[in-house]
Image: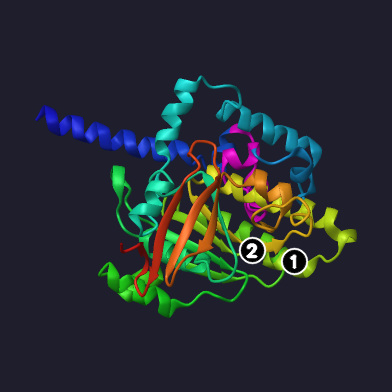
Amino acid sequence: MEDQVVEEEVQLNGEEEEESFFQDIDMLQNHGINVADIKKLKLAGICTIKGILMTTRKRLCAIKGISEAKMEKIKEACNKLMDPGFLTALEFSERRKNVFKVTTGSSELDKLLGGGIESMAITEAFGEFRTGKTQISHTLCVTTQLPGANGYPGGKVVFIDTENTFRPARLRDIADRFNLDHEAMLDNVLYARAYTSEHQHELLEHVAAKFHEEPGVFKLLIVDSIMALFRVDFSGRGELADRQQKLAQMLSRLQKISEEYNVAVFITNQMTSDPGATMSFQADPKKPIGGHILAHASTVRISLKKGRGELRIAKIYDSPDLPENEATFAISTGGIIDAKE
């Protein structure tokens, strides 16, 4: 009998944790904020208390119908509901227990990434064409739905496609490897095609609203690729500063979405040849595009290179906690798998 009570308490605590993680802005009604203003915030893609604390005063005032006085009142109410101050490292370590890892389909690649693609972080994979970036993206669409280690329940995926490379038929092949029902698996992947860099940014607002509608259901957001449309919309050195500013805003939004809704973010990136590299005798004259803005925004950066045949080599290029290391994986009909010796 006691065991049953303990189990029920654990279950209730889990539900409370989930609720406290997603604090809905409807709670502001109890602090004197009217429903019309809350609706305006939701239309702007701000749906949680954490989301308001992550938004600048300037941006809040830019929302139609939100005056400076209203904005100050909203900020004040949020500070009462959520302490914006410091935590001890121990408290933060407890909060980090909400973080989960999504398997890539290859145990070698998972080992390199410390268990898989991490939530509340941006993982960037860059490489030339045919290095497996889109194949990893497609495999993740399926593996995210599988229950995993440490009680990970599986969940839905959002795929933002900027290069027209998304193929549902490819997902069916990968689903066969894991014996998943095709219809149910495809129904759990939300797809959007972005046509301009502005459209890509707007889609993120819709993504935030979707994550809010179904809290805790979506586990992964994929953008394949992050820079393709910026390369088209901004050209030459004259527009570089504007491009980097817009890119920084979008990456900041991605980072906030990942932390606000506890989802993993996986982005792919293209390469460019570096004319200065030949002068300094670097081994590899190619580098990922996006400059320092993208380099600092990505939590984990993986460099992908072609190997023999279907083999690909992944290397940790930058990470706050993973050692610089390499792993070899292969691309098969069933997606990303371990390389056969």
Which residue occupies 69% across, 41% down?
55
CA gap, disc 1 and disc 2: 10 Å
Looking at the image, residue 4 sits to the left or right of residue 34; the answer is left
SS for dot 2: loop
Looking at the image, residue 240 sits to the left or right of residue 100; the answer is right
Tell me the kind of residue under disc 2: Gln
Residue at the spot of label 2: 270
Quarter of the picture containing the C terminus is bottom left
Badge 2, how many Cα within 10 Å: few under 14, some, many 20+? Answer: some
Q: Are marks 1 and 2 in contact (CB under 8 Å)?
A: yes
Return the disc, 1 or 2, that comes first in the chain's sequence. Answer: 1
Residue with the most extreme right position: 238
Q: Position of residue 335 (x, y in %)?
A: 38, 69
Tell me the kind of residue under disc 1: Arg
Number of residue marks: 2
Q: Which residues are magenta?
A: 31-53
Which residue occupies 47% across, 65% down?
307
Q: Position of residue 248 (x, y in %)?
A: 72, 49
Mark carried by residue 231: 1
